Image (cartoon, rainbow, N blue to C red):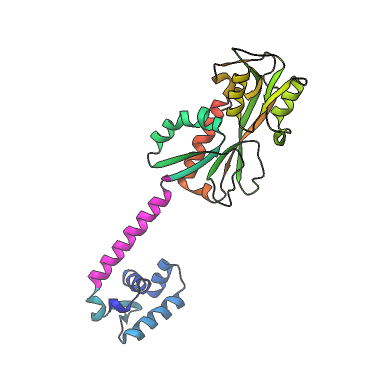
Amino acid sequence: MNADMRWDELELVSEIVAGGTLSEAARRLGVDQTTAARRLGRIEARLGAALFDRIDRRLRPTPLLRAILPQLSAMAAVAEEAGGRLRRSRQKAAGSVRVSSLGLVHRLVLAPALGELATAHTDIEVELAIEDRSVSFEERQADLAVRLGRGPQDTATIRRLGRLPFALYRPKDGAHSGRVVAYGQDYAELPEAIALQALRPDARVLARSNRLDVLAEAAVSTGAAVMLPVLMGDADHRFSEVAGTRGAAVRDVYRLAHPERGKAPAVRAVARWIDATVSRRLGQG
């Protein structure tokens, strides 16, 4: 008989045995009583034998069904255990989470705090992906992102974490007045680019780049001044801050989450860690 029946049919039979009535079996399975009765009728018609006797408004297994009740009970137990494991896995914070951000955020903020996350969530693996552009959540390029500014992430869940000030820095050794390194023209509208132009309007631009780490190295090499986030400038002992320039530009820092993946326990756990870590590092948490 088992070879002729699908699991959903065996499940229905098992629930009728457990509940004693079609109505109770239907309730357990989340279907209406008419549907359950129709399915049982099809099973018995295909087998050419009755599986239940109707006694005192209850369904009692016939001898044919009683002969396989131990196997049916074992299958139901295995199915319940499998379902429980799936539910527990879904609720557990485990798996790989991809976090996109600028190199300075990963290097100076998130990577140094990874020990806290690893201790709290032993089954989470974090991929710290360095991206200079806004990732596409629709294309699943990241689960979470930390950005300076919101960007065109209309479908992402967004949370503001704080503000990051910029300052003008110059190399401690070999600094030359009247020299700067700057963003490329495509980034001319950014607050730090506008601030650099205002602070050093007549300076000679020696090099341009869209990467802050490249600009920092170029500044050290040429003795030029450079506009840097204070997290980066203060941490680099090759630079000294130009007095009176701190806060000349300020960028809002946001954490973005994939609209669907953001609901996964592992992603939620990493998002909470990012929120606390970034806010604390900015002195605003």
- Principal SS element in the magenta part? helix
Taking the magenta stretch, the answer to whether it contains residue 81 is yes
**Picture quarter with the N terminus:** bottom left
Front one among 17 and 270? 270
Front one among 282 and 228? 228
Q: Is residue 231 visible?
A: no
Q: Residue at x 42, y 71 (%)?
A: 26
Please determine whether, in this image, residue 15 is positioned above or below residue 266.
Answer: below
Tell whether 43 sits left or right of 212.
left
Tell whether 95 sits left or right of 78.
right
Please determine whether, in this image, residue 53 is positioned above or below residue 264.
Answer: below
Which image quadrant is residue 178 in? top right
Residue 98 position within the rendered picture, expressed as x and y whole percent measured from the top left: 49, 43
Q: Residue at x 29, y 77 (%)?
A: 3
Front one among 61 and 38? 38
Residue 159 position within the rendered picture, expressed as x and y whole percent measured from the top left: 60, 39
Q: Is residue 187 visible?
A: yes
Which image quadrant is residue 275 in? top right
Please determine whether, in this image, residue 217 is positioned above or below residue 88.
Answer: above
Q: Residue at x 37, y 72 (%)?
A: 12
Segment colored magenta: 69-95
Front one among 267 and 48? 267
Taking the magenta stretch, the answer to whether it contains residue 93 is yes
**Picture quarter with the C terminus:** top right
Residue 93 position within the rendered picture, expressed as x and y whole percent measured from the top left: 42, 44
Tell whether 245 sits left or right of 72.
right
Tell whether 131 sits left or right of 124.
right
Residue 189 position within the rendered picture, expressed as x and y whole percent measured from the top left: 74, 33
